[in-house]
Amino acid sequence: MIVFVLFKWLNILFLFFLLTEWSFCYSLFTVYSLGQMTDLLYTEKDLVTSLKDYIKAEENKLAQIKWADKMDSLTATATKDPEGFLGHPVNAFKLVKRLNTEWGNLESLVLSDTTDGFISNLTIQRQYFPSDEDQTGAAKALLRLQDTYRLDSNTISTGDLPGVTYKSRMTAEDCFELGKIAYTEVDYYHTELWMAQALRQLEEGEESTLDKVTVLDYLSYAIYQQGEMERALEYTKKLLAIDPEHKRANGNLKYFQFQLEKQKKAADEAGTKKEPETEKVEVKKKKKRSAKAEFKLIPERKKYEMLCRGEGIKMTPRRQSRLFCRYYDNNHHPKLLLAPIKQQDEWDKPYIVRYLDIISDEEVAKVKQLAKPRLRRATISNPITGVLETAHYRISKSAWLTGYDDPVVEIINERIEDITGLEMDTAEELQVANYGVGGQYEPHFDFGRKDEPDAFKELGTGNRIATWLFYMSDVLAGGATVFPDVGAAVWPQKNSAVFWYNLFASGEGDYSTRHAACPVLVGNKWVSNKWIHERGQEWRRPCGLSESD
C-alpha cells in the first residue's frame, strides 16, 4: 500500500511538471520576458534533481522494510501451532526481540519524513513559478499568434512552426485548457477551435484522462453561441450517444430542436409570400482602385496583421529605384570619415533608414547583461496625464539604462548623436525591451499629438522628434516593425538599427509614422531604443517653412 500511494503521488507530480513545462516556456506574457525564462529552466532542473534525490531516499526506505514477505511466511507457520512454535526458546527470544526492537525501529523508519529536502526546495522555488494570470496570458498569446499569422489549431498543437528547433506537441488536455480559457473570456470562436482540436486528438486514440463528454459539452455550447444551431445539435447528439443520461445535454437537445423547428416554420411562411418583381438596374462598373487605395480602405487591425505576415503592399519599381544603399559619414563627421556607416533606405515616406553593423556582439551582450536584472513590464506614456503606465496592448519587458550605468551605454549614446547629428542630452534613457513568444506592441505613435499637450510635460524636453531602434537579436519568425498607414514592414536584423523622424521640421507630427511591433511567433526579440526630444535640436534641425517640411 505504501508503494502504491508513493508512486501514485509521484505520477501526479510528474504529470504536473509535464503539463506545466509547456506553460513555463510560454508564460512570459504578464510577468516574464524570454530572457528571464532561462532562469526558470534552471529552476526546474534544480527541482528535478531534488525530486530524484527524494525518490532515491524513498526507495532506500522501502528496501529496508522488504522483510515483510519473510515475516508473512514465518507468522503463517507459527500460528498453525503457536505453543509448539514458542516451545523452542530461540523462537520465543526472537519474537520478544522483534516486537521490542525491530518493530519499533520499523515504526521510526516509516514515520521518518524524507520529503523535507524536496518540499523545502519546492516551497522556496514556488515564489518564482508562473501564476494563474500568467497561464491565462500564455493562452491569450497563443490565440493572438493564431489569429495574426493565420495558424490552424493542428499546426500549433503539433508544434510544426517555422524555424523551430525544439518541437513540442500539445496534449488533448493542453488543447482543452486553452479552449476553457477562451471560454472564460467569452471567446467562443477560439473555444470551438481548441475544443474541436482536443476532440480530434482523443478520437485519434491519444491516451488521456480527459473524457469526450466534457469536450463535447463545451464544443456544442460554443457553436450554439456563434449562432450555428444545427451543428450544435449534431454535437449534442454525439454527446448523448456516449452519455444518454447527461442532464444538460438532454435539455439542450430539446431546446435546439424546438428552435430549429421554429426557424423552419418561419422560413416556410416567408417563402409563401411572393416577392414583387423588381426592375433590373444596370450597375455601372466602378473604376478599379489601385492596390494602394484598396489597402487604405482596410481596417487598421487587418492591415497590421497582413504586414506581420509579410502581405503588405509592394512598392512600385519607380519608388524602389529611389531607395539606395550607401556609406554614410554625416556630412564628413570627424568620427565617421575613416569609418563611414553602412546605411540602407527602408522606406521613402516616411523616410525610414537602417544602419547595418552599427552595434557589436560584445556591446549587445553587455546591454543585455545590464538590462536583464532590471526588466519590468513595459510602460507607455498616458496621453492625458503624461505618467508612465502599463497597457494591455504593449506586452514586453523593458529596462532603462543611462551612461552612468556603464561606459558602453555612453558610447552607444554618442554613436547615435554622431550619426543623427541630434542632441542626446535631452533624449530619454536607452530603453531595452525583450519580447518573448507572443510579445507585441500594437499600433501607436511615439510622439504626443495636439490633443495630448501634457504627454511629456514631466520631462520638460518637448515632443519626441525622432526614434532610433536597435535590433539586438535575429527573430526566427515574426517580430517585424510595421507601419500600417503606409504598408511598410521592417524585419529584425541583429546588430542593425532603424531611424525615422516622428515630427516634421516644422514641429508638426508625421501621422504616417504610426507603427507597431508584431508578435514574436518563434524566437526571442531583443531591441533597444532611444527617443530623441525637441529641446536642443533648434540649431541641429532648424524649422521648415511649411507644416509638412
Image: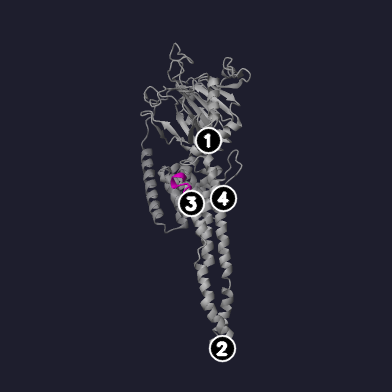
Q: Is residue 208 visible?
A: no
What residue occupies the far right of the structure in this picture? 338
Mark positioned earlier in the residue sequence (3 or 1):
3
Q: Is residue 140 above or below residue 17?
A: above
Distance Cα–Cα, label 4 vs label 3: 14 Å
* Along the viewing direction, whichever of 189 and 29 lies nearer the viewer: 29
Q: Which residue is mark 2?
A: 87
| Amino acid type of the residue that numbered disc 2 sits on in the rendered structure | Gly
Distance Cα–Cα, label 3 vs label 1: 26 Å
* Along the viewing direction, whichever of 362 and 156 lies nearer the viewer: 362
Q: Which residue is mark 4?
A: 45
- Element class at badge 4: helix
| Amino acid type of the residue that numbered disc 1 sits on in the rendered structure | Leu
| Amino acid type of the residue that numbered disc 3 sits on in the rendered structure | Ile
Q: Which residue is mark 3?
A: 124
Q: Is residue 374 above or below residue 252?
A: above
Please give the label number shown on residue 532.
Answer: none
Mark positioned earlier in the residue sequence (4 or 3):
4
Q: Marks 4 and 1: which is nearer the front?
A: 1
Distance Cα–Cα, label 2 vs label 4: 59 Å
- The image shows residue 319 at horizontal and vertical percentages of 56, 18
| Amino acid type of the residue that numbered disc 4 sits on in the rendered structure | Lys
Please give the label number shown on residue 370.
Answer: 1
Image quarter of residue 182: top left
- Element class at badge 3: helix
Mark positioned earlier in the residue sequence (2 or 4):
4
Point out the stretch of residues depicted in magenta: 125-134
- The image shows residue 288 at horizontal and vertical percentages of 50, 21
Mark positioned earlier in the residue sequence (2 or 1):
2
Distance Cα–Cα, label 2 vs label 3: 58 Å
- The image shows residue 216 at horizontal and vertical percentages of 46, 51
Do labels 2 and 4 touch, CB within 8 Å? no
